[in-house]
Amino acid sequence: MILVQACFTLLIAGPILLGAAFWHRNRSLPAPSHAGHRAALLNSAVLYALAFNIVFFLQELFLVLGKKSLGLVTYLYHNNHSWEGTDPRTALMQGTGALAIFVFGVLCLAWFRHVRRATGIWKVLLLWLAFQGLMQSVPQLMVASFAPDTDVGQALVGYLHMHQSLVALLAVLSMVATAGISAWFATPVLELSPSGEGLDNPKARLRYVRDVAVGGALVGSALVVPFRVPPATQAVAPFLLMLFSLPWLWVAAARVTGVETIPNAINDRLRWEPAALLVLLLLVFRFVLAPGVRF
């Protein structure tokens, strides 16, 4: 358990320490001037919010379908699910949601690599879908070590009776994977930048990722809140996800070299299509899912 706590501390503090070391080494390095990335930030935020909600919906859907396969009566809501009836395998089915969105994230990542040279805004949605699929699933192994009553914890500990040492090992591997996967996304985010961004300068790379990824995720997480409340406690989840992942993505941008930019349309102007889709999705969450859908 001490090892798990130490790794968790590094997961949170690691980007801070690496960022401080970078600042100390490069404090005299001038940052190239730039007008800013307001359109890219806002477009990215809307796409981030779309991706978060789609992946969260898929997780709850597969949790519902897993229990439905046991013959239970299940209900899907905008921020949760419930069921009626009992079955000893219910605890095992609590892991189906995380498994489903992990597979979904891997598939989206494979698709993204296939269309990597595309310049349309929907490629960015695909990138955020891959990110959300992985970041909403992989850290659940870590959380299971601290809270066995969570979804994955119930499957591993409650049903499979996994030994504490093995749960701890999975938690450590999950934290390493969370940091590594997050850092990997720095390169595809930087590839979105317009020509002439000066990405040979590490401060320019950090600034672009700060605006498009970190800023986009922060604003996007705020846009997710109306999808999740009430209760108010549900509003915290998207910001917690940021805490584990975005700092690693940001700090990794300082070390990425040789980026070949593929200028994306998110940099050009505000796009209405993702915003319209987000509003439509909100209506589905509020008026269809919030009352509950029976399966």
Image (cartoon, rainbow, N blue to C red):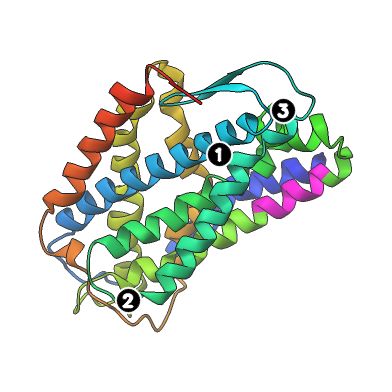
Label 2 close to label 1 by CB (< 8 Å): no
Q: Nearer the viewer, residue 287 or 258?
A: 287
Q: Amino acid at mark 3?
A: Thr
Q: Is residue 215 left or right of residue 159?
A: left
Q: Amino acid at mark 2?
A: Asn
Classify 210 as above or below 264. Answer: above
Q: Are marks 3 and 2 in contact (CB under 8 Å)?
A: no
CA separation in Å, label 3 and label 2 = 53 Å
In this figure, which residue is indicated by the disc labeled 1?
62
Which picture quadrant has residue 224? Answer: top left
Q: Which residues are magenta?
A: 167-175
Location of the N terminus by quadrant is: top right
- Residue furthest to the front: 71
- Look at the image and say whether residue 89 sits in the magenta stretch: no
Q: Between 260 and 15, which is closer to the camera in this rendering?
A: 260
Q: Which residue is mark 2?
A: 201
Q: CA distance from mark 3 to mark 1?
A: 13 Å
Label 3: few (<14), some (14–19) or many (≥20) C-alpha neighbours in 10 Å: many
Q: Mark yes or no: residue 90 visible.
A: yes
At mark 1, the secondary structure is helix
Residue under label 3? 90
